[in-house]
């Protein structure tokens, strides 16, 4: 008996004994996936493209090699384990070579020791990273006309959304008023049909719709009654992100009888491909998400939008760039797909990014120029500011104020929290009718068990003239967003103003010796909060938007990569919603929602990238990323430096001057991105070289997750040809190389530099002339002048003789040794 036969016999025997509770594991195998396979296996020709571009998934070569990999996965599992003791969920063949399997921890150990297995990781959870912006970004006048107007913007570009599905009947996705779409030859996605309703999710605008839930089902998390075993959006999040990127143009946003404007996607003629892998209660699992990414790339999407991030680090992987998720996205980029991911919502604290790798475009969130303000005028003349997307109470008329805890039907119901005003049954309709109901903003609103919508419903059902929600204490990090309501209503967010209201109410209300109210004499009126105020201080980096520096491992060592990459609108974004969506309790049953998150910022970039791809169909993902970053702006609409929302010592919100760790290269400027002048290009081999030259990364680990190997570890990670420069550990001096390619006509560029005084910066040559299509290297030398223990910021600016401006941020921290 050979050693191999003996080990397999031992493993089959061992496989009969299943001890621990079964879990889902992601296994990677030796042997290249389809996108990287350059031949070498007898009987199977190479499937990898010569350069980083799309592969024809329907070719005989690809199908044959793909089946070969899957067969190897099945043979291994069959050899190791008794039939019925495991369940394979997915075979990954296109982007990574491996599979997802439901087995016991003991069986996982057996797999780790099996020949041909590179890595075995326990599956981990991911979560969602939860209109006016087209005008704010200058799309209708500045960008859409160059592509033939809104009715051609994004034509034939397919954006894939790995999210919570879609609500296909929504006007943002319907075909009723739009010109018919032709076929998209390069896209081969499937369209699921709902088993119960026989509903087809595709309509020409939506070209693919599939769902992935095998890992969620195996983990016991999936509930078909609310999660829907189809691409139908049971959450709202997926419909919202798809509409931001590619929703139809000019869709009226109506709620409670009021029109808040007209919504449009960034690229209204782009096609939508849905890959549902997120669900309303538990989020999702990496096994399902990787299967969705693999399918999307195989189907031929041009852009991949991921408004999703990990709940926690993977159990067995130390390096942020090396896990099945990031490895699959690296292969997606190799296949020519532009990958966009939300940065995360852990701001404003440093090192809160959930998107780490340089091949991914990581998006921070900004507030745009709209603010919905309202006010409450008291009978004593005081005017209290607040939030309230609501109509006003009747003009020139004041109404009696009645507090919820003074109008209870039975004092014994205090244990149900009637001051939240969530339940009309505990309040006295006779005392509330025709008056303004005062409610308390409790911790229940923070955790999501109470909502402003329910307060409005309560007040309306009791016949109130309106309602006031008063915040009496603030939990650090509480974010107050205006909520559209159908009756006059306001949220007083400042504790001091709430105290003014309570003091006035108490001094105006007479009570008997038991504390019961004799007469309500406090008066007030609510203003009109339906019209936004426009601010020139926009954009600002949103408080919740995740911040850099980027980290290279889960012990939080800084990486030589700038993250986030770019800033886009992500605060109070109006877009489509699924009527059965529950992601936001304030929008239950609605067709539109106004929500915030880096989840909302990411699809802005996906849609704008579709416009760039439409104009430049042969550009690489790195070229598109470069065009967006180098043309972005670090100034607000008033021409002042961008500011970032931050906490001051007392946990109150303040504004500080923003840095590249807040906004990356700056706020997206779509018109300029269509014609960047120069690009910084990079490909698969460059990203592998970047990892090989990153200190602390084991070359064997790189080989486990990529098809690349580290032939030489010379050079620095900071030499990756990205449109930013980051040196997290600068000792004395370092010279960094960058290569630019001219994508315009012949032009001469003058190069200037700027840096804070602790670090000297110099660029060479000071000027260069590039012919169309030509590439040229330039050098940037950084030298430590003094040690501050913090990062220094600067930039390299290249001004072209034909008017192009190319700017890259520079970030470095000096050390003695």
Image (tube, helix red, strand yellow):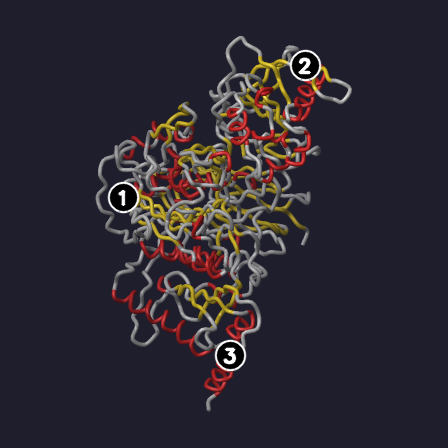
Callout 1–callout 3 Cβ contact below 8 Å: no
What is the spatial separation of the Cα atoms under label 1 and label 3, in whole angstroms? 49 Å
Q: Is mark 2 on a helix, strand or loop?
A: strand
Q: Where is residue 451 in the image (x, y as percent from the top left)?
A: 55, 34
Q: Residue at x 48, y 27 (%)?
A: 484
Q: Which of marks 1 and 2 is in front?
A: 2
Query: Which label sits on residue 669?
Result: none
- Count neighbours of disc 1 (C-alpha within 10 A) and say few if under 14, some if 14 to 19, many if 20 or more: some
- Given the current orientation, which residue lies at the most extreme bottom position? 1
Q: Name the residue under label 3.
A: 16
Q: Name the residue under label 1.
A: 203
- Sequence order check, earlier mark of 1 and 2: 1
What is the spatial separation of the Cα atoms under label 3 and label 2, in whole angstroms? 78 Å
- Sequence order check, earlier mark of 1 and 3: 3
Q: What element carries label 3?
A: loop
Give left or right: position of 716 versus 153.
Answer: right
* Residue situated in front as seen by the camera: 790 or 151: 151
Q: Which residue is drawn at 28% across and 40% down?
A: 155
Q: Mark 2 points at which residue?
A: 519
Q: In which quarter of the image is residue 140?
A: top left
| The C terminus, quarter of image | bottom right
| Visible residue check, residue 356 | yes
């Amino acid at each position: 008996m050979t050693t191999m036969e003996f080990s397999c016999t031992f493993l089959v025997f061992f496989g009969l004994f299943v001890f621990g509770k079964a879990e889902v594991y992601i296994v990677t195998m030796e042997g290249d996936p389809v996108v990287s396979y350059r031949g070498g296996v007898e009987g199977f020709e190479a499937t990898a493209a010569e350069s980083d571009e799309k592969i024809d998934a329907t070719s005989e070569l690809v199908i044959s090699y793909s089946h070969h990999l899957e067969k190897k996965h099945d043979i291994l599992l069959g050899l190791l384990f008794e039939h019925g003791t495991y369940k394979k969920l997915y075979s990954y063949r296109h982007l990574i070579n491996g599979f997802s399997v439901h087995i016991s921890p003991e069986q996982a150990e057996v797999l780790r020791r099996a020949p041909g297995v590179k890595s075995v990781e326990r599956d981990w959870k991911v979560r969602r990273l939860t209109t006016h912006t087209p005008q704010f970004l200058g799309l209708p006048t500045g960008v859409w006309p160059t592509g033939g107007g809104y009715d051609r913007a994004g034509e034939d570009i397919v954006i894939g959304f790995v999210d919570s599905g879609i609500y296909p009947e929504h006007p943002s996705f319907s075909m009723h008023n739009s010109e018919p779409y032709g076929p998209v030859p390069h896209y081969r996605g499937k369209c699921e049909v709902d088993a119960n309703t026989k509903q087809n999710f595709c309509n020409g605008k939506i070209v693919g719709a599939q769902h992935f839930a095998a890992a969620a089902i195996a983990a016991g998390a999936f509930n078909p009654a609310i999660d829907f075993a189809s691409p139908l959006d049971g959450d709202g999040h997926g419909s919202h992100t798809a509409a931001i990127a590619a929703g139809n143009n000019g869709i009226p946003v109506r709620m409670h009888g009021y029109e808040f404007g007209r919504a449009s996607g960034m690229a209204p003629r782009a096609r939508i491909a849905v890959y549902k892998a997120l669900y309303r209660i538990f989020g999702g699992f990496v096994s399902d998400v990787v299967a969705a990414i693999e399918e999307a790339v195989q189907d031929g999407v041009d852009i991949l939008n991921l408004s999703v991030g990990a709940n926690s680090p993977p159990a067995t992987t130390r390096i942020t760039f090396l896990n099945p998720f990031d490895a699959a996205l690296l292969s997606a980029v190799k296949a020519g797909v532009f990958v966009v991911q939300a940065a995360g919502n852990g701001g404003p604290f440093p090192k809160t990014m959930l998107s780490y790798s340089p091949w991914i475009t990581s998006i921070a969130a900004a507030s745009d120029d709209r603010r919905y303000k309202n006010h409450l005028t008291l009978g004593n003349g005081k005017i209290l500011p607040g939030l309230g997307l609501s109509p006003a109470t009747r003009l020139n008329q004041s109404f009696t104020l009645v507090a919820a805890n003074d109008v209870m039907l039975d004092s014994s119901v205090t244990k149900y929290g009637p001051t939240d005003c969530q339940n009309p049954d505990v309040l006295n309709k006779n005392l509330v009718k025709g008056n303004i109901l005062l409610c308390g903003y409790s911790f229940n609103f923070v955790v999501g068990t109470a909502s402003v919508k329910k307060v409005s419903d309560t007040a309306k059902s009791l016949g109130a003239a309106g309602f006031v929600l008063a915040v009496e204490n603030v939990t650090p990090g509480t974010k107050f967003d205006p909520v559209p309501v159908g009756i006059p209503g306001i949220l007083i967010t400042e504790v001091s103003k709430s105290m003014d209201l309570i003091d006035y109410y108490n001094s105006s209300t007479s009570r008997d010796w038991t504390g019961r109210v004799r007469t309500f004499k406090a008066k007030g009126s609510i203003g009109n909060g339906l019209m936004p105020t426009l601010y020139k201080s926009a954009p600002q980096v949103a408080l919740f938007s995740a911040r850099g520096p980027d980290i290279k491992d889960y012990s939080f060592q800084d990486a030589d990569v700038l993250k986030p990459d770019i800033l886009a609108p992500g605060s109070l974004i109006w877009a489509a919603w699924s009527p059965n969506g529950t992601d936001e309790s304030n929008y239950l049953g609605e067709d539109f929602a106004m929500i915030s998150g880096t989840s909302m910022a990411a699809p802005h970039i996906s849609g704008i990238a579709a416009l760039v791809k439409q104009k430049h169909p042969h550009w690489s993902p790195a070229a598109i990323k470069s065009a967006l970053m180098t043309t972005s702006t670090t100034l607000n609409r008033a021409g002042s430096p961008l500011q970032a929302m931050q906490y001051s010592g007392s946990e109150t919100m303040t504004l500080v001057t923003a840095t590249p760790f807040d906004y990356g290269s700056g706020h997206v400027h779509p018109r300029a991105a269509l014609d960047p002048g120069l690009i910084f290009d990079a490909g698969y081999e460059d990203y592998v070289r970047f990892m090989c030259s990153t200190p602390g990364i084991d070359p064997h680990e790189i080989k486990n997750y990529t098809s690349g190997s580290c032939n030489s570890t010379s050079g620095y990670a900071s030499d990756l040809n990205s449109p930013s420069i980051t040196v997290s550990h600068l000792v004395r001096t370092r010279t960094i190389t960058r290569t630019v390619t001219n994508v315009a006509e012949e032009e001469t560029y003058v190069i200037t530099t700027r840096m804070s005084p602790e670090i000297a910066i110099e660029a060479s040559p000071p000027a260069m002339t590039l012919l169309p299509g030509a590439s040229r290297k330039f050098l940037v030398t950084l030298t430590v002048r003094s040690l501050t223990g913090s990062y220094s910021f600067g930039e390299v600016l290249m001004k072209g003789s034909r008017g192009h401006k190319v700017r890259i941020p520079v970030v470095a921290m000096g050390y003695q040794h």
